Each structure stands twice: as structure tokens, then as C-alpha cells.
Image (cartoon, rainbow, N blue to C red):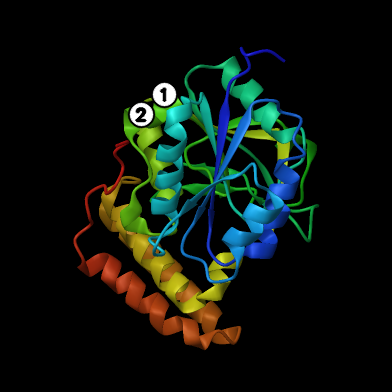
Amino acid sequence: MNNETPLVVVVIANWNLRKDLLECLGSLYETDYPRMHVIVVDNNSSDDSVASVERQFPQTQLVKRKENGGYAAALNDGIRAGAVLDPDFYLILNNDTLIPPDALGKLVNVMLSDERIAIAAPKIIYHDHPERIFSLGDHIYPWLPLPVRVGRKAFDRPSYSKTQEFDYLFGCALLMRTKSLKEVGLFDSSFFMYYEDSDICRRMRDARWKNVRVGSAIIRHKASLSSKLVAEKMVYLRARNRSWFYRRYRHGPCRTATFLALLFGSIKTVLTYFFTGKRTQIRPYVNGALDGLRQAVPPLADTHWN
């Protein structure tokens, strides 16, 4: 293909997942898409990730952070580093994913079909159970206090292979239009990790952009490997950020209904932890949920381009 082919900058944030990062890069460099530049942002790993990438994939641009500032901050650093190339799109990719050769091209083709699409995400399937979908996305309904999740852990089916518009998409693989990012801003680093993807999808939606799931493009996801390295901290962040997110953005007919829905969901989660032997996660989950309610919701942080 010629220079009219859009340039895609791939941004991968990494923290202490050397083996999986190398597998991800190996799959990525087998793509049949001709104009791609890969940036790995390392969050001060201690597992030889950086040296391994330099040795095995020297064509990869490395951004080395001096501290682990979180997933969202790392993505923003990668996006800014790639801005000098003036890409048409950014592919945000988790380091625990495997991407088939044709997936990126399919995502780009969907983007080119509609200039109002801000984010195109592939269909995410479980690496160990490829017959099951990780999730398709979430729909907002004005009469419901929380969005409705579609396809979570469902068996794949032909109807899931089409392109569908969603309000929220999961952030393990997102092809993002540079123009829309420049309009609404980058990821909110105050979340550190979790709900930064929902937040940027919401800002795109509120700015009248579209978020779509491309069912014909598939990636395999090993699911939350980095979070398992510090499980209790991640449980805390997920609960806190959930409260922050739903306080920042109104859902449903009234905030009281949303609060009650979140409360019942939290009770269910605590009971699940209790009866499945994950009792050490109850305290950080409760503390996170309470801090998310007690603390002021922070303003958008680090979303600027420069």
C-alpha cells in the first residue's frame, strides 16, 4: 500500500509483565497492516522488561518512566511521544493481549468508513477460552440507574461479529482517532488504573463522537495479569474509581437510584469475596468504595497534549 495508508501508532503500557509483553509484541509485528509504529511505555519495571524489548524488538520505541504513575499516565506519555509522527490513529493495547495479523486493518477500515467514529475496538475473547467473549461493551438507557453490559463472558455467536455502537468500551484494545483525542483530551490520570477507559468513552460520547465494537476484528486477552501482582491495591482502586466515575457522570433518572444500585452491587461483591475465599479483598474493596464517596471527585488530570 502507498503513503495514503493511515499511520497507526501503537501504545502499550507495561509493568513487570516481561513474558507477556514480548508475546504481545511478537504477535503485533506479524500484522499485515503496513504503516505502524510501536511505543512501549514502561512504568519502572523491575523484571528486565526494558532490556528484553531492546534485545528482541529493537524497532520498538521505548519510553522509560522513573516511577509507576499508573496505566492512564503511561498511555498519555506514549500518545505524546507518538504525536511527533502525526499519526491518524492510536492503537491502545494491553500488554497481556495477542493480536491476529488482520485485526488492525479491519479496525482502520471501519474508522475510514465513518469520520465520526472516535474509537473502534475489536471483539475481545479470552485467551484460554476463545469460545467466550470478555465483553462487547455497555449501553446507557435513560430510565436505568446503571449501564447495561452486553456479552460479558458469553459464548461467541454470529450476531457478535457485526459492528455495533456502544456507550462504553473496555480499554484493553482501542483504536482511537487522533482528531477526537485532540478535541476531548487524553486519559484522566487521576484514575491511575480502572475506569479511565469508561471516562474517555463518555467524553467522546458527550462530544457527539461514536464508539463502536468491530466484531470481525478479534484479539485474545489474558485478562488483568498486572493487577494480580498487587491484587489488594487493584481491588481498592476499582471500587474507588467506580464511585468517582458515577458521581462525575449522571446515569439514569436520579442520582439516588444510581447510588442504591451501586450499593447493592457492592454488597453482592463483598458476599462473593466472603464465600469464595477472597476475604483479604473485602477490606480494600470497602475502603475504596467509601473513599470514592467521601473524597471530592478530582478534576480531569493530565489530559493535555503538551
Is residue 96 shown left or right of residue 11?
A: right
Q: Amino acid at mark 2?
A: Lys
Q: Indicate the secondary structure of the residue bearing disc 1.
A: helix
Q: Amino acid at mark 1?
A: Lys
Is residue 258 in view from this perspective?
Answer: no
Q: Image height check: is 70 above or below 62?
A: below
**Which x, y percent locates residue 182?**
36, 28
Q: Are marks 2 and 1 in contact (CB under 8 Å)?
A: yes
Q: Indicate the secondary structure of the residue bearing disc 2.
A: helix
Is residue 37 shown left or right of residue 242?
A: right
Residue in front for this viewpoint, 127 or 274: 127
Which residue appears at 31% of the width and 42% of the height?
Answer: 303
Q: Image height check: is 149 above or below 289?
A: above
The label number, if any, that marks residue 179 in the structure image:
1
Residue in front for this viewpoint, 151 or 34: 34
For the residues labelled 2 and 1, the Cα–Cα distance comes to: 5 Å
Residue neighbourhood size for the residue with mark 1, other residues' Cα within 10 Å, grouped as few (<14), some (14–19), many (≥20): some
Q: Which residue is mark 2?
A: 182
Is residue 41 in view from this perspective?
Answer: yes
Which residue appears at 61% of the width and 60% of the height?
Answer: 51
**Which x, y percent locates residue 278?**
55, 84
